[in-house]
Amino acid sequence: MAEFQQMNRVFRMGTTTIPDPAPGEPPEQALNHLRGVFPVLAHATIDGPVVEGGQLVYTVLRPPAQTKGAQVPARAS
């Protein structure tokens, strides 16, 4: 008979690993619980999971930095 072991879910944001605040909810909903502590998560997405050391690791992807209409002038040849 096969044995099943439930893995812990964590979120990785850069070098920071955050334990799952709501294990019974989908990853997107669990991430919503962390938005009060990490405002950058308001526009973040998640990638994964990847199994690392017996844990399901979801990577938090922050959106790229944007500028407000700044344009780089073309170089003269």
Image (tube, rainbow, N blue to C red):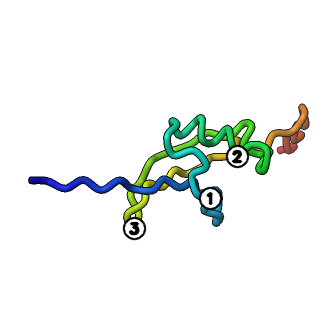
Label located before the other in sequence (1 or 2): 1
Relative side of 32 to 72, left or right: left
Label located before the other in sequence (2 or 3): 2
Q: Amino acid under label 3?
A: Gly
Relative to 15, is 64 above or below?
above
Q: Residue furthest left?
A: 1
Q: CA distance from mark 3 to mark 1?
A: 15 Å
The residue at the point 60 percent across, 41 percent down is: 30
Q: Nearer the viewer, residue 62 or 53?
A: 53
Relative side of 23 to 66, left or right: left
Q: Nearer the viewer, residue 5 or 45?
A: 5
Find numbered disc 1 in the image and state the secondary structure of the residue it sits on: strand
The residue at the point 9 percent across, 53 percent down is: 1
Residue that mark 3 sits on:
53
Q: Residue furthest top?
A: 69
Asked whether disc 2 touches disc 3, contact meaning CB atoms under 8 Å apart, the reply is no
Residue that mark 2 sits on:
34
The residue at the point 43 percent across, 54 percent down is: 56
Task: Estimate the x, y position of residue 19 in percent, counting from the top left.
Answer: 58, 57
Q: Amino acid under label 2?
A: Leu
Label located before the other in sequence (3 or 1): 1
Residue that mark 1 sits on:
18
Asked whether disc 3 touches disc 1, contact meaning CB atoms under 8 Å apart, the reply is no
Relative to 6, is 27 above or below?
above
Quadrant in the picture for the C terminus: top right
Q: From the image, state whether disc 2 or disc 3 is nearer to you.
A: 2
Q: Residues within 10 Å of mark 3 (few under 14, many from 20)?
A: few
Find numbered disc 2 in the image and state the secondary structure of the residue it sits on: helix
Find numbered disc 3 in the image and state the secondary structure of the residue it sits on: loop
**Quarter of image, res 17:** bottom right
Q: CA distance from mark 1 to mark 2?
A: 9 Å
